Image (spheres, rainbow, N blue to C red):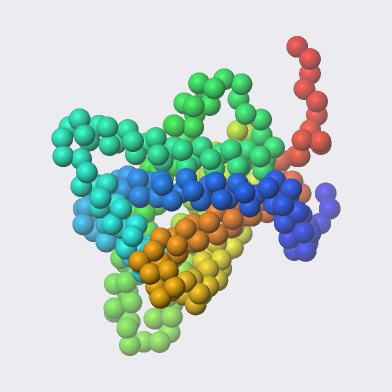
Amino acid sequence: MKHLTAWTLLREGVNAFVEDNALTRGAAIAFYAVTALAPVLFIATAIAGLVLGESAASGAVHFQLRRIMSQESADLVQAAILHVRGGHHTVLGSVIGIAALVVTASGFFTEVEDALNVIWQAPRHESYLYQLVRGRVLSLVLVVVLGFLLLFSMLIATGARFLGHLFDNEPVPRFLVVMFDLGLSFLVVSVLFAAFYKLLPNCRLRWRDVLVGSCGSAVLFELGQTVIGLYLTRFITAGIYGAAAGVIVLLIWVYYSAQIFLLGAEFTKVWAHHYGGWKPREERAPALPN
């Protein structure tokens, strides 16, 4: 086992990113993500709302959205969530609406699964029915996980804001509260990425193979959001795009977020190859004949 330097990790990860055509796959994921963003967040908000109430959950989602994207994009997504929530007035309409939400959300997760299967060199299952059922079940599981992560982050963030009000005039404790808030965001993103990297690919991966990589991916994600935010604030303005500025900002944010996610998956693969139990296809033992 050779020692993995930061330069080796960067070089092998970027090379794999290019070889796997991740830019194009990220664009496909971004398209599905834009269409599935409101349904997924609606379901996650509904799960968190069972404990905290619908109004509190909706407000927390909007607050978290404003942390990672522009005000216009956050308002746009929030309006879409409210539209989804207000569109079901009858039992039949609710059933049809929920089914449509599940199909839309599962389309996004299926696209992510396909991209991760390419990255991890995982074969697709021969049975289309099995693949379809597995994709839908995993989609629901990950949406539920997202809902509980949202609930967890809301509870912790509420406590952090309460402590911030208590120590509002104290510089050191206030600084610690800000760092705690950043640490919470890092933890939530790390767990969510680890769940995606572990559950979606059609191959067996150990949690220890994906945890280190998911933490590194979360760092990339947080840094990337800062860079993307500066770019969008500086170059994408309402004066240039008019009323469509919010949509343009949302599309760019989702696209670059998808690229960061896939680049993090490539780094995770390189890490698992050197220090974990994953091997590329050319190093695997050939299957025994029946």
Q: Residue at x 49, y 77 (%)?
A: 234
- In this picture, residue 4 sits left or right of residue 180: right
Q: Residue at x 22, y 52 (%)?
A: 54
Q: Is residue 223 above or below residue 14?
A: below
Q: Residue 189: x, y in percent?
A: 49, 57
Q: Residue at x 57, y 20 (%)?
A: 127
Q: Quadrant of residue 11?
A: bottom right
| Residue at the far left in the pictured view | 90
- In this picture, residue 162 sits left or right of residue 91: right
Q: Is residue 170 above or below residue 95?
A: below
- In this picture, residue 6 sits left or right of residue 174: right
Q: Residue 128: x, y in percent?
A: 54, 22
Q: In the rendered picture of this protein, how many numbered marks are placed on residues?
A: 0
Q: Residue 204: x, y in percent?
A: 63, 34
In this rendering, does residue 147 appear at all? no
Q: Quadrant of the C terminus?
A: top right
Please tell me which residue lies in front, 38 or 185: 38
Q: Residue 162: x, y in percent?
A: 29, 72
In this rendering, does residue 183 appear at all? yes
Q: Is residue 107 above or below residue 74?
A: above
Q: Residue at x 46, y 49 (%)?
A: 33
- In this picture, residue 232 sits left or right of residue 216: left
Q: Is residue 239 above or below residue 5?
A: below
| Residue at the far top in the pictured view | 290
